[in-house]
Amino acid sequence: MILDRVLLLLTKKKKIILQELDGVDSVKIVPFMKRIAFNITCNIFFGIPDGKEKDTLFEEFSVAVKGCWAVPLDIPGTVFHRAMQARASLCKILSKIIDERKRQMEEGTVDVNENIIYSFLSLRDENDEPLIEEEILDMVLSLIMASHDSTTILLCLLVRLLSRDAEIYNKVLEGNKIYLTYA
């Protein structure tokens, strides 16, 4: 089930990526891969569909990430202050998504194994109490951060390897011709 969802998602993403790259001579690969990694993470892990909400999440997430490396001075105008505001905005958006997932679970209209948010909502602590929303938000943001950075780096290294080694590029292209024809 999950593999089918991933393959369907990748097929859709391939079409969107090809449309974005049509007629473009060059691409800033790191920002491009960051957006792809974020979109795939949000779709697969959290079931967040493409749209304005996900675009807003990406913009806020990009600002919040910069705050991880900033001097922790929460003074207006600093990178850290903007990052804290972005995190608050992220939490507000994600809280709405979590509330929607809770409602769907209560109605019984979803499979709780469909994405990680449902799994977090199903977890219980040692006192058989559900996790509080702040814990779920922290875990969701941590997963986005971890998958975002590792996936972006891996994709960029792959593009670098393919662009520098024609033999590997041709082998990968040949090995994926069947997949590439299903556009």
Image (cartoon, grey):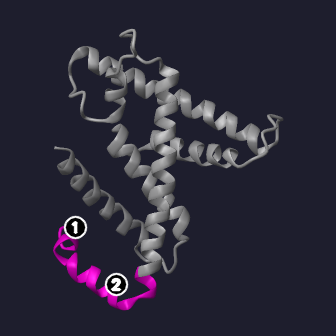
Mark 1 is surrounded, within 10 Å at the Cα level, by few (under 14), some (14 to 19) or many (20 or more) other residues, namely: few
> Is 114 a magenta residue?
no
Chief SS of the magenta region: helix
On the question of residue 170 being in view, the answer is yes
The kind of residue tagged 2 is Tyr
Q: Which of the two residues, 91 or 140, is positioned nearer the viewer here?
A: 140
Residue 82 coordinates in the image, percent (x, y): 72, 40
Q: Secondary structure at mark 2?
A: helix
Q: Which of the two residues, 113 or 83, is positioned nearer the viewer here?
A: 113
Q: Is residue 164 above or below residue 3?
A: below
User: Which residue: 43% across, 18% down?
Assistant: 131
- Residue 97, image quadrant: top left
Q: Is residue 135 left or right of residue 111?
A: right
- Per the rendered image, the range of residues in magenta is 162-183
Q: Given this view, does label 2 or label 1 mark the residue nearer the observer?
A: 2
Q: What is the residue that sits farthest to the front in this orientation?
A: 126
User: Which residue: 54% across, 27% down?
Assistant: 92
Residue 124 coordinates in the image, percent (x, y): 36, 17
Circle 2 residue: 169
The kind of residue tagged 1 is Ala
Residue 10 coordinates in the image, percent (x, y): 28, 58
Q: Is residue 74 above or below residue 154?
A: above
Q: Is residue 85 above or below residue 20?
A: above
Q: How many marks?
A: 2
Residue 73 coordinates in the image, percent (x, y): 82, 38
Mark 2 is surrounded, within 10 Å at the Cα level, by few (under 14), some (14 to 19) or many (20 or more) other residues, namely: some
Q: Secondary structure at mark 1?
A: loop
Circle 1 residue: 183
